[in-house]
């Protein structure tokens, strides 16, 4: 048998994608050219037409800029899910804000709205309500945004969606990125995500204030807009730095790739959905819990995560991983709970704080799902899983 190498996810680059990048390479501007605005415009049109979409160098940069634009800093509290990539929490630490985690729902694996509601009651009593809550649309499945929105009104916190997995997903027929229930949403274009720009991300918001701040601060806090300047411009070369920003820009080469990839987004989502549906069928009867999608939303299927459902298999979690990896299957764990990372342990978090997320992480297994995966690859994955579970 030939050795396989099936990653859990990977980019899908077409000849058109390559040509789009090469075209920019032959143009006068490699960075800050016309492709960035075009990319932002198309992103907006595919995600509910919010007024402001700002492409940035990564989702991490996007989260940092948005948290900062919402006033996060020392003395502010940011709550998120432990079942996420570390960047969601780290961006709050960049601002100097305090981070806390709300346990997940065992079925959606997203932040549990029941856990959130009960934590808010306790936090109000001791005067420690959060300033910002960041739901993460884990695996591409949107969170229960209407419920989170209504809690945000009741308790007065802002909401930012970490939508790094969820470009192409929908919630109550709104595309993720429409920001109907949040101040902003942030996407990632890392190669394993729904589309890629190499590295890259975007900030989506309806707020002109947030939009203007993140656009300026992604480029050092510099403006070229005369109406915002303190002095009258002494020459055409003049710009002003109004506040302390960063270098979080994306390049025109990346934006050209992103534009070309975005045209393929519907095809990407539908291919991933086909693979997910086929997994649902092929895995029936195995001792695993399958991902569930509530009726009022659709997943982009960035990840396909199963959980070992009986405790005998759960005890062999590590060995099952190893056996599948040995067979060339890039199974992965999304995610080892963020609060158990050494950096967060050093901040005072400990094992046992978030039992649902911790239990989930001892049983979860991300199976490969990406657009270049064949049915034959998928059959091989399921066959190997069957063998390994029965051995
Ligand atoms: C990938 C990812 C990020 C960070 O994205 P980058 O573009 O690599 O900075 C943030 N949050 C989640 C949930 C992610 O999966």
Image (cartoon, rainbow, N blue to C red):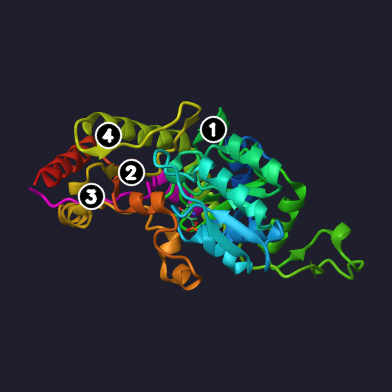
Earlier sequence position, callout 2 versus callout 4: 4
**What's the CA distance linking mark 3 and mark 4?**
20 Å
User: Is 18 in the magenta?
Assistant: yes
Q: Is residue 327 magenta?
A: no
Front tag of 3 and 4: 3
Report the number of numbered marks.
4
Q: Which residue is mark 4?
A: 279
Which residue is disc 1 drawn over?
171
Disc 3 + disc 4, Cβ < 8 Å: no
Mark 2 to mark 4: distance in Å?
A: 10 Å
Q: Is residue 229 left or right of residue 5?
A: right
Left or right of 313? Residue 43 is right
Q: Is residue 27 above or below residue 96?
A: above
**Horizontal and vertical percent for residue 10?**
35, 50
Label 1 element class: strand
Q: Residues within 10 Å of mark 3 (few under 14, many from 20)?
A: some
Instruction: Using the numbered discs, state the Cα–Cα distance from disc 2 to disc 3 in whole angstroms.
Output: 14 Å
Q: Nearer the viewer, mark 2 or mark 4?
A: 2
Whole-percent x, y for residue 25 in the image = 52, 59
Q: Report which quarter residue 42 is drawn in.
A: top right
């Amino acid at each position: 048998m030939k050795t396989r190498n099936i990653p859990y996810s990977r980019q899908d680059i077409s000849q058109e994608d390559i040509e789009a990048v090469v075209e920019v390479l032959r143009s006068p501007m490699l960075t800050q050219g016309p492709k960035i605005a075009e990319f932002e415009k198309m992103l907006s049109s595919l995600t509910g037409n919010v007024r402001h979409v700002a492409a940035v160098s990564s989702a991490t940069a996007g989260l940092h800029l948005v948290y900062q634009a919402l006033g996060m800093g020392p003395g502010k509290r940011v709550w998120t899910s432990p079942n996420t990539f570390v960047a969601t929490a780290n961006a709050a630490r960049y601002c100097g804000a305090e981070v806390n985690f709300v346990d997940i729902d065992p079925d959606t694996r997203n932040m549990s709205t029941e856990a959130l509601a009960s934590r808010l009651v306790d936090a109000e009593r001791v005067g420690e309500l959060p300033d910002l809550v960041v739901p993460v649309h884990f695996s591409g499945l949107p969170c229960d945004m209407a419920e989170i929105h209504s809690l945000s009104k009741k308790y007065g916190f802002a909401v930012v969606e970490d939508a790094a997995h969820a470009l192409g997903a929908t919630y109550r027929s709104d595309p993720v990125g429409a920001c109907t229930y949040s101040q902003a949403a942030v996407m990632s274009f890392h190669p394993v995500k729904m589309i890629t720009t190499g590295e890259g991300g975007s900030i989506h918001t309806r707020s002109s204030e947030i939009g203007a701040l993140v656009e300026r601060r992604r480029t050092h806090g510099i403006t070229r807009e005369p109406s915002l300047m303190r002095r009258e411009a002494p020459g055409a070369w003049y710009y002003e730095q109004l506040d302390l920003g960063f270098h979080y820009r994306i390049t025109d080469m990346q934006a050209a790739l992103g534009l070309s990839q975005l045209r393929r987004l519907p095809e990407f989502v539908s291919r991933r959905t086909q693979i997910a549906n086929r997994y649902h069928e092929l895995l029936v009867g195995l001792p695993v819990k399958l991902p569930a999608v509530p009726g009022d939303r659709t997943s982009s299927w960035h990840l396909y995560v199963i959980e070992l459902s009986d405790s005998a298999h759960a005890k062999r979690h590590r060995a099952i991983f190893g056996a599948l990896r040995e067979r060339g299957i890039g199974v992965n764990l999304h995610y080892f709970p963020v609060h158990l990372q050494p950096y967060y342990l050093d901040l005072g978090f400990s094992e046992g704080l978030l039992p649902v997320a911790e239990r989930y992480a001892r049983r979860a297994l991300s199976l490969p799902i990406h657009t270049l995966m064949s049915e034959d690859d998928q059959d091989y994955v399921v066959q190997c899983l069957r063998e390994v579970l029965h051995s």
